[in-house]
Image (tube, helix red, strand yellow):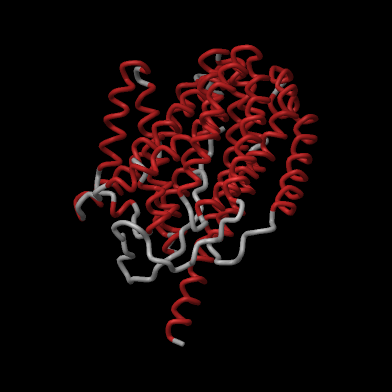
Amino acid sequence: MPLQRLRSGFSATLGRAGAVVSASSVLAAGVAFAVNLLMARSLGPDSRGDVALLLSVAYFVTPVTLLGVDRLVLRQGGVGPAHLGGYVLVLNVVAAAGLSIVLGWSAVVVGAVSLCGAMTVVARARALHSGHVRTFALLFVSQQAGILLTSVGLFVAGVTDWRLWALGYCLSAPVFAVVELRSALRRDALPVGRLALTLLPGAVAALVVTRVDRVLLGSLGGAYELGLYVTVATATEPVFWISQALADRRSSTAHDRTGRLAADVAVFTATSTVLSVALWFAVEPLFGPQFAPAKAFIVPLGVAGILLALYRQGVAALVRSASPRRASVVELATAAVALPVYVVAVTRWGAAGAAWGSAVVYLVGLLVSRAAGRGLAPAVPSRPVEGPVLSDPRGTVAAPALPVTQPARAEP
């Protein structure tokens, strides 16, 4: 009986954490849409593309500075910003210094955005695993509020310099840096270890699948095409955020996750269809007549949104299964397909190629994840973990492995 009560209380705590993290996905979607609208109205396609390219570079730096620790948290628990010492801060400073050779002052934005993203991801993972959401809520809300308030201020002031809009993403960085420095003074840095490093390729591969199209489009197609593309892509992303919230909710319970594909297809298809139709009529009134050419990307990006949502559910189910390493294999295989597809598609067809190419890549990832998960049993909720155990500082409750989902972020 005492053990049952302990497990029941632990499950309830995880359920509350799942609800909070799910709510963060909704908040991120709202902030992303609002900032996307304000930025598009103020900057136009060209400068809008400049901001998007800079943020995409920052999101590629984030998993490298984490060195796989974010996924180690989900597998073993008990690790958060208070346990990371100062190495995340140090690595982001080093990355910014190195990138400054190529990017100049923009490297400051990359380092700041990467720092915020890295700490938010780890805090989010720990909140899901331990059920304690205070640190995650503080960091996430401060980040989203800073981005939104700055964007509103720039819009009201009529600022049209994209560099100032990019700097708005740095305002919460001092809060994150203080948290990191305090933890470094209180505790020893976490030894990353081989297990965390083996999870790093999967994290990088996940970003290759979902973000390399924007980097290539900005580099090969120019800022104008990227600005058109990312404006529509961000407006259709609520489908992904619903998928993210659903994965978070499922990760905080121990119920069976099989037999849900049909329901997921119905929900994601209905949501994407409604969004796409509404966006078709709203592009010019919302974003301005200069974004009229972006209507050509609505259909492929709507289809891609459905496939991405289903693909992420498949990867999440693999990480939650008894053979979680298959998730990394699936992500690496999908990334291997994504690179040549995006290069060819963007080179030949520009933004339209990126849109349809993303749909092809996500379809491949979905099929591979379904094949890899066939016949796999879900993980035992309280099984012992492999490797060195990172225990919860308050107790020794063994928590279930949770799915790896993308960080909650607002990238307009």
Specify the farthest residue to the front.
375
Q: Quadrant of residue 300?
A: top right
- Residue name at image x 34 percent, y 55 percent: 79
Please indicate whether residue 232 sits to the left or right of residue 16 in the image. Answer: right
Residue visible at 61% across and 64% down? 256
Q: Is residue 37 visible?
A: no
Rendered residue at 53%/19% (across/down) = 216
* Number of callouts: 0
Residue 160, quarter of picture: top right
Q: Residue at x 22, y 49 (%)?
A: 189
For residue 322, side relative to residue 79 (left or right): right
> Which quadrant is the C terminus positioned in?
top right
* Nearer-the-camera pick, 369 or 89: 369
**Residue 227, image x and y in percent?**
60, 21
The correct choice, above or below, for 392 with respect to 212 in the image is below
Q: Where is residue 86? Give x, y as percent.
A: 25, 44
Rendered location of residue 389, percent (x, y): 31, 61
Observer able to see residue 99 = yes
In front of the other: 46 or 300? 300
Vertical relation: 221 (above or below) 335 = above
User: As displayed, is residue 211 above or below residue 347?
Assistant: below
Where does residue 217 sit, x and y in percent of width and height?
A: 56, 18
313 and 50: which one is in front?
313
